[in-house]
Image (tube, rainbow, N blue to C red):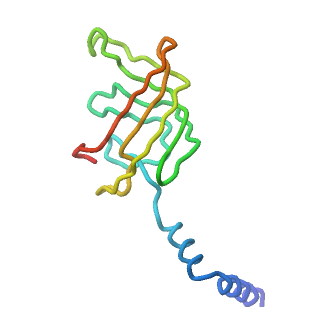
Amino acid sequence: MKTVRRLALVTTLLAGLSSGALANITAGAASSPTRLLSCANATVVRPSNFVLTCADGYTRLVATRWSIWSSSEAVGATTFVTNLCTPNCVSSQSSRYTHASVRLFAPSATRHGTLFSRLVVHYRARGVAKTFTFSWLGDPAF
């Protein structure tokens, strides 16, 4: 008897939804979020740690906390780690810039699904504001 009442309640609720509202619920559940393509050729969402330069690993995001992750952009706070290659890349140590901000944007349809194609990191080096930009467009793996 309880099953019949539950079924009647669900049927009543579904009948009250417009077909457009029901389509939006279904589409929202089926669609996947915009992602990033990792160096391991896997797609990821909201990664805490992420290597940007796969060939050498000299540029990466560490301990990232995402405040926004939508289909059009992602914004977060991170520690930006990079090798400045001074005097050269082999003998230079990586530098860590805490309190950096990161923004992903420009989603692109790819063979891996929808991926963010651009990145901007804002950080401070010795008190001077700096910006690092990166694009995956043109990368054969993308």
Horizontal side of 8 relative to 113 (left or right) equals right
At 37% from the left edge and 32% from the top edge, which residue is drawn?
Answer: 133
- Image quarter (top left, top right, bottom left or bottom right) of the N terminus: bottom right
Residue 127: x, y in percent?
Answer: 52, 13
Horizontal side of 45 relative to 88 (left or right) equals right
Q: Is residue 20 above or below residue 12?
A: above
Horizontal side of 68 relative to 53 (left or right) equals right
At 47% from the left edge and 64% from the top edge, which residue is drawn?
Answer: 31
Residue 58: x, y in percent?
Answer: 34, 25
At 67% from the left edge and 87% from the top edge, which residue is drawn?
Answer: 11
| Total residue callouts | 0
Q: In this view, does 140 lie above or below 64?
A: below
The extreme left residue here reads 140
The extreme front residue here reads 129
Q: In this view, does 69 lie above or below 127?
A: below
Choose top left, top right, bottom left or bottom right for residue 24. Answer: bottom right
Residue 8: x, y in percent?
Answer: 72, 89
- 26 and 138: which one is in front? 138
Residue 17: x, y in percent?
Answer: 65, 81
Q: Is residue 31 above or below residue 11?
A: above
